[in-house]
Image: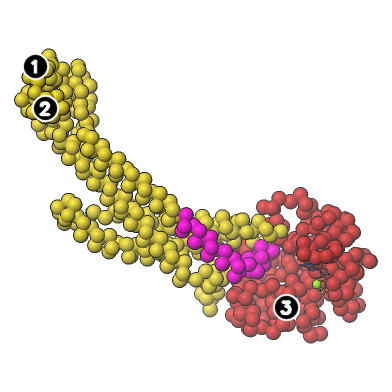
Chain colours: A yellow, B red
Amino acid sequence: MAEGRRLKGRDPLGLRRALADRLLPALVAAMALLAAFALAGADGAGRLAERWQQGEAGQLLLQLPRDAAPEPVLAQLSALPGVVSVAAVPDERLRQLLAPWLGEVPSLPLPQMLAITLRTEADQVALLEAVQGIPGAQLELRSEAVRLAMRLAEGLGTLSLAMLALIGLVGAALVAVATRAGIAARGETIQILHELGARDADIASRFAARLAWLCTLGALAGLAIAIPALWFLAMQALPVVLARDAVASDLPWPLLALLPPAGALIGWGTAWITLRLWLRRLP
Amino acid sequence: MVQMSGVGLRYPEGEGAALSGIDLALAPGSFSWLLGPSGAGKSSLLRLMSLSLRATEGEVVVLDTRIAQLKRSGFPALRRRIGVVFQDYRLLPHLSVYENAALPLRIQGLTEARLAADIREILRWVGLLERADSPPAALSGGEQQRLAIARAVVSRPALLVADEPTGNLDATQARRVIALLREMHRMGTTVIIATHSEALPEEYPAPTLRLAAGRLVSHG
Ligand SMILES: Nc1ncnc2c1ncn2[C@@H]1O[C@H](COP(=O)(O)OP(=O)(O)OP(=O)(O)O)[C@@H](O)[C@H]1O
Ligand SMILES: [Mg+2]
């Protein structure tokens, strides 16, 4: 008996019934599913871009003035950590590459080019520092194609951020509507508590806690659907795009793990604000 | 304890003033009757004292606090020092009898361990201890009224405002309730009771305020 009393005492507004755990969590689950897809899209685009960039990072070109002696530079750069190889690009190869733009002009003075292969993109820092110390040297970091791909990935990232913001807004609107329904069902009770001396913050935080909980439930349910779906997509897409099988780390786990707390935050904040605005009308 | 000068009240949806030109003072520790025919404004006057309405005119001072000057954040603490028996009880339908009585103490943040004894004592006094786990809807009108009274006194308020607290009770129960309210008064609470029964004030003589058509016609 005492246990039952205490449990009921924690819900003086009767919110467990006024804000039932059916419709809102279902709607939040749908929003969480969309959010998970947007996150996975952004993450996938980011990883792909990173991969292109890394592939290109293996193919850096360093331009030296015509009259510079390449040997010391070759020796210096080869010794850098992360540099796999440094080789002078032969004149004939260079002329071959430039022919489409310059035509056959054997007399044209060409700069000297060194092709540098790096192990990973991270190794660029040491290289950049070294290059700064070489007079007249210019490093061609990224090709135009990679720059385009980067811009595409950035665009995709922005798009999914906008989608996430939209999903957040719609979610907040859902919570506001649910909170108003709860207020409509419990308006009299809220007024009584108010008149007995309950603080606005106490009343608001009870609603906020309930809605945060419902949104967390919804987000978890959404994830429960999103994760198998994303895994299925990864299994289909990765063999085609990256020529390998999907592994667990291909899913953006940390981002997905943020969805329930983000849902809770939206639920809490929206309910809190809705309640505080409504309570201001009471004397 | 309570002072009003030139107080008037207009309801937003009401035509005309529900109260006008009210001047009164309730001394600390006093016990008063508030009499008047139905519609005279008794409930309205008590709602001004219990801070569930704000006067539209004049000055109201409750528990040494000028209400007009009080910041919004100051109201809850002041309301907790006032016990109210609402004419329409205003019980919470989804809470048990026990939890309804416990509400003022829960709002004060007391733990179950600290409030349980007080709740049982007050429920025993109003004869509802056996019904502690029932919902209010399962109580008779008189039992609901006694629960409303229990809730109003359980926090030992400095000011007790009771609106027709015996309207639904038989003579024996009514006497019991008045005895409880007089006991509160004896322990230092300022008590004001609205009723349209002339019999009770005759049985328990005390200073009497009379309202007619929103005006105070006698005081003392
Ligand atoms: N919420 C309201 N809105 C508009 N007018 C109201 C409201 N409450 C009360 N009134 C009006 O104010 C006047 C005083 O009402 P009040 O309830 O204070 O009377 P009362 O003396 O308590 O009556 P009773 O003995 O029947 O309880 C009445 O004319 C009533 O119609
Ligand atoms: Mg009345």
Q: Is residue A153 above or below residue A254?
A: above
In the visual, does A36 lie left or right of A131?
right
Whether labels 3 and 1 share one chain: no
Helix, strand or loop under label 3: helix
Instruction: Indicate the amino acid at tag 2.
Output: Ala
Q: Is residue B17 above or below residue A86?
A: below
Q: Quadrant of residue B139?
A: bottom right
In the rendered structure, find residue B145 and report the number of the disc placed on it.
Answer: 3
Q: Nearer the viewer, residue A225 or B199?
A: A225
Q: Residue at x 79, y 79 (%)?
A: B167
In the visual, does A79 lie left or right of B178?
left
Comparing marks 3 and 2, which lies closer to the viewer? 2
Q: Which residues are magenta?
A: A169-196
Main SS, magenta region, reads: helix
Helix, strand or loop under label 1: loop
Image location (x, y in percent) of residue B20: 88, 61
Instruction: Indicate the amino acid at tag 1.
Output: Ser
Q: Nearer the viewer, residue A90 or B71?
A: A90
Instruction: Indicate the amino acid at tag 3.
Output: Gln
Disc nearer the start of the sequence (2/1): 2
Question: Label 3: chain?
Answer: B
In the rendered structure, find residue A99 and report the number of the disc placed on it.
Answer: 2
